[in-house]
Image: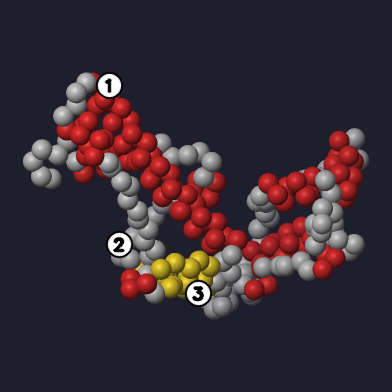
């Protein structure tokens, strides 16, 4: 760092401030996954399919059969995505930091820099949240690489795991359900597919506020909720 640069603008100071800024608590997908350091910019992961099955019966004294996992997993990889941006510091702010006329001017400049850093940090956190959401809901993500090349990474979600309702089967058409829409049956069908493929019971579902509103005002759900409230049924069973 060159001589005369205010301490607050030195790289080590800026990095320390950024690292101590609290992360927003509403970053749902960021809080769902943990951070894993990687030694290179080529990221590799394992995709697992199906269930492990059960150990077979064998005759007493017979050798144990070998367990095969062919077709149960595959490997994916992608080059890491990079993102960055910068902010502008005008000469008035810099002058207040270098030769402050009053303590008030200096502190005002400090707060301006802190707000700019917080804005950059929040935008960075939202980009990370967006990437995680794309991996779950779309199964792929497109970004730019060196030289302006467009790169798409596909996370290998099986096509049968992505169901799209069309026509009158849609849960919301012009403010109401389609003539043949059956949201409760659709949800239980998805649950059954999940159990068949993984051998595990789902413990929850993720919906956005728009979908939640559609389901709340759906007559099928309202009937089920009313039965649950009066002890005739349980929505969560």
User: Is 125 on the left-hand or right-hand side of 18?
Assistant: right
Instruction: From this view, report whether residue 179 is shown above or below residue 93.
Output: below
Return the residue at label 3. 74
Q: Name which quarter of the figure residue 7 lies in.
A: top left
- Alpha carbon separation for disc pair 3 and 2: 21 Å
Name the residue nearer the viewer: 192 or 115: 115
> By what rule are the colours in the image chosen?
secondary structure
- Label of residue 104 in the image: 1
Residue 18 in the image: x percent, y percent?
32, 41
- Alpha carbon separation for disc pair 3 and 1: 61 Å
Residue 137 in the image: x percent, y percent?
60, 61
Mark 2 or mark 1, earlier in chain: 2
Q: Nearer the viewer, mark 3 or mark 2?
A: 2
User: Is 17 on the left-hand or right-hand side of 156?
Assistant: left
Q: Name which quarter of the figure residue 26 lies in.
A: top right
The residue located at (43%, 44%) in the rendering is 122
- Label of residue 39 in the image: 2
User: Is 43 on the left-hand or right-hand side of 202?
Assistant: left
Q: Name which quarter of the figure residue 200 lies in.
A: bottom right
Instruction: From this view, report whether residue 99 is shown above or below residue 126.
Output: above
Label 3, secondary structure: give it. strand
- Alpha carbon separation for disc pair 2 and 1: 45 Å
Label 3: few (<14), some (14–19) or many (≥20) C-alpha neighbours in 10 Å:
few
Label 1, secondary structure: give it. helix
The residue located at (58%, 69%) in the rendering is 157
Instruction: From this view, report whether residue 60 is shown above or below residue 30.
Output: below
Q: Nearer the viewer, mark 2 or mark 1?
A: 1
Residue 189 in the image: x percent, y percent?
78, 62
For the view shown, which residue lies furthest in the bottom direction?
70
Label 2, secondary structure: give it. loop
């Amino acid at each position: 760092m060159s001589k005369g640069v205010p301490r607050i603008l030195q790289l080590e100071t800026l990095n320390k401030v950024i690292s101590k800024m609290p992360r927003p608590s509403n970053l749902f997908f960021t809080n769902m996954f943990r951070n894993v350091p990687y030694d290179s910019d080529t990221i590799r992961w394992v995709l697992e399919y199906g269930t492990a099955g059960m150990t077979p019966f064998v005759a007493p004294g017979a050798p144990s059969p070998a367990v095969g996992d062919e077709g149960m997993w595959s490997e994916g990889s992608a080059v890491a995505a990079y993102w960055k941006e910068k902010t502008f510091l005008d000469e008035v702010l810099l002058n207040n930091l270098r030769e402050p006329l009053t303590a008030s001017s200096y502190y005002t400049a400090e707060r301006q820099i802190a707000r700019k850093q917080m804005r950059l940090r929040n935008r960075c956190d939202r980009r990370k949240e967006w990437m995680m959401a794309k991996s779950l809901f779309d199964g792929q993500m497109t970004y730019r690489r060196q030289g302006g090349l467009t790169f798409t990474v596909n996370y290998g979600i099986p096509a049968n795991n992505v169901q799209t309702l069309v026509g009158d089967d849609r849960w919301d058409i012009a403010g109401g359900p389609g003539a043949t829409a059956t949201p409760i049956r659709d949800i239980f069908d998805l649950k059954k597919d999940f159990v068949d493929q993984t051998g595990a019971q789902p413990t929850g579902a993720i919906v956005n506020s728009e979908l939640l509103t559609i389901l709340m005002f759906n007559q099928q759900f309202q009937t089920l909720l009313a039965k649950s409230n009066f002890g005739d049924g349980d929505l969560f069973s």
